[in-house]
Amino acid sequence: MSSVDGLNNALNQKGDTSTFQTLAQEINQQFNELKTEINYAIGGLNVSDLYGQMENLDNQKQDKTDLNLQTDTKTVVAAINEVNGRLNSVVAELKAGWNTVILGKLYPIGWAFLGKPLCFTTDGVPVDFRVRNMNNSILHDSHTFDIYVDVACTLHTSTTPNDCISGIAADHLILEYFYEGKDGQDLDTVTELHGAGLELPNKVLGFRHYGNNSFTVDGSTVYAIVDNDGTVVAVWGGDNTGGGTGTNERYYETVYVNVARLRELSPNDDVEFTLYGTWHSQKDNGFIHLGLQAYAGGTPEFTVAQKRLSITNLPNTFSSNGQIGCHINANVSGGSEPFQELYSPAFKIILKANSDKIQIIQLS
């Protein structure tokens, strides 16, 4: 009699519980025998072991995918566009599978180069991609990277996006350089002013470059560049030594710029601010971001919290919270000289002459 027949008979004998007990024992025995047969069939593994093996294989499958795809790598020479001797954009026609893109020239660019690339088909449909193996070859004076796409498409990326702010009242700017705990610890920055017609007693602010004046804000010392008439033209909020936490917590270094005064001092020439950076302690992901705060009006009153300068008494006319990012590759001690060569150039901010335009250029 099968277990099913036994169960039917037991159901018809409602008052006899012993029949149920006997049947339960029989079913349990048959189930154990079945498990044993399964174990032998799969080489002695029990079911939980089997699931563990399946999960392991699943994880290994993803690890091996890239290796398998590499067997069909194609070499692609990219078309490049330069501005003032710097790489500005890259266009490459990619084939399905892995492509090794060769720029044919060595450029001082980091992983941020791949921060905003676009891949699309001839019909303009976006294509997903993955990137690996950024390589510089000093010997062959070239830069290469591998990119994988599922279908043939075009890669286009701009390495130095030139964003302009215009049409807003911006008498004052605060440049916010920030990084996250996962990017590194103790970013040291130097901001240098340039301008053909700009005459100032000092043009550099940052770690070990303290301008020509200082004052106290909210109990913290900030450092300033003051012009020959005693007007503050730039302020640095101080050195932030935080980070290295592996988290998304933000750490700021900030620089105030007196736009109105600098336009008065240099009415017919552009005024430029170039930011340089290095990781004094540890470099992890290495990325930093630039945020801008613009204000209109007269004399600013400052507050500072954890090196982040703010203006409290003037209307905030523009706010950008770090859409522009770059990669700081330098990992030398802050204060190393010449910083223009040993630090990584990060951003350039240009106050355009005879206009209200403010241009932002990503440098790395």
Image (tube, grey):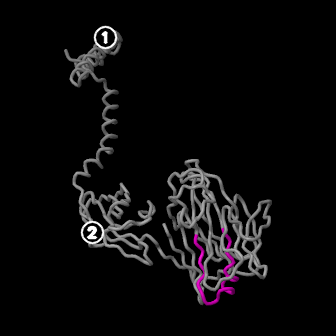
**Label 1: how many Cα within 10 Å (few below 14, some 14–19, many 20+):** few
Q: Is residue 297 above or below residue 129?
A: below
Foreground pick, 54 / 114: 114
Residue 185 disc label: none
**Label 2: how many Cα within 10 Å (few below 14, some 14–19, many 20+):** some
At mark 2, the secondary structure is strand
- Write down the residue under mark 2: 93
- Give how far across and how far down residue 356 sits, in percent: 60, 85
Foreground pick, 2 / 300: 300
Q: Is residue 264 magenta?
A: yes
Q: CA distance from mark 2 to mark 1?
A: 74 Å
- Give how far across and how far down residue 71 sits, in percent: 22, 51
- Give how far across and how far down residue 316 sits, in percent: 67, 75
Q: Residue at x 68, y 71 (%)?
A: 256
Q: Residue at x 31, y 26 (%)?
A: 47
**Relative horizontal placement of residue 226, taking residue 136 as reference (left or right):** right
- Write down the residue under mark 1: 22
> Which quarter of the rendered picture does the N terminus lie within?
top left
Q: Amino acid at mark 2?
A: Glu
Q: Is residue 262 magenta?
A: yes
Foreground pick, 39 / 4: 39
- Give how far across and how far down residue 240 sits, in percent: 66, 57
Q: Which residues are magenta?
A: 255-274
Q: Is residue 227 above or below residue 219?
A: below
Farthest-out residue, left: 1
At mark 1, the secondary structure is helix
Q: Amino acid at mark 1?
A: Thr
